[in-house]
Amino acid sequence: MNLESNVERIYIDQEKLAARINELGEEITKFYSEEEEIVVIGVLNGSFCFMADLVRKIKQPVTIEFFGCSSYGHSTESSGNLKITKDLDHDIADKHVLIVEDIIDSGTTLSRMKIFLNKRNPKTIRIAALLDKPSRRKVDIHGDFTGFEIEDYFVVGYGLDFADKYRNLPYIGILKPEAYKSQI
């Protein structure tokens, strides 16, 4: 199966992604003081490309963690239920936490994750999101550091998937409706 044949068009190309991630790294570096260590928590699985590129642009010391949760399954709509698939390996109490998310859509998953992590008493929790889709928001949550605000398209690539496919595309593309309607 040629994944690219199911992409209607490239929405954000590799060059724009790289440039904006560079800027986000600078914004985050300026936000935290030089001596502050940041616990960067990547939300699995979608954030892995974005997180890998982003942490290399942050000048402060970082500790890497991953948190697995899902509310999509094989659908294009969030179920609203938070299913934890991988918890943190280390304590985050009294530490600066930066959650790295691929996309803020309805915001439900991220909101529940933030509440869950707040119970562990971090010093601060901030959110870095590659994409923000405010037209779909169901809860009041936003990124502190946001790459791109996007329209209401179902996008894939650069870590974002549909049914665990398309993550390896080097750009953000709009998935053709027929590519996911046949699988729902």
Image (cartoon, rainbow, N blue to C red):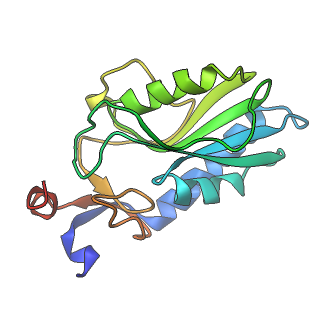
Which picture quadrant has residue 93?
A: top right
Say whether residue 142 is visible: no
For the N terminus, the image quarter is bottom left
Q: Position of residue 69 (x, y in %)?
A: 45, 42
**How many numbered marks have been drawn onto this rendered protein structure?**
0
Q: Position of residue 74 (x, y in %)?
A: 24, 52
User: Relative to 157, does residue 29 appear above or below in the rendering?
Assistant: above
Q: Residue at x 15, y 64 (%)?
A: 179
Give residue 144's position: percent from left, percent from top.
Answer: 57, 29
Q: Which of the 4 image quadrants contains residue 26?
A: top right
Left or right: 31 with respect to 37? left
Seen at 85% across and 34% down, the residue is: 36
Residue occupying the far bottom of the picture: 1
Q: Return the residue nearer the eye: 150 or 47.
A: 47
Residue 117 versus residue 4: which sits nearer the camera? 117
Q: Residue at x 62, y 29 (%)?
A: 126
- In the figure, 128 relative to 49: above or below? above
At x 13%, y 60%, the residue is 183
- Which of these two is toward me, 125 or 91? 91
Residue 118 in view = yes
Where is residue 38 shown, x and y percent of the image?
77, 38
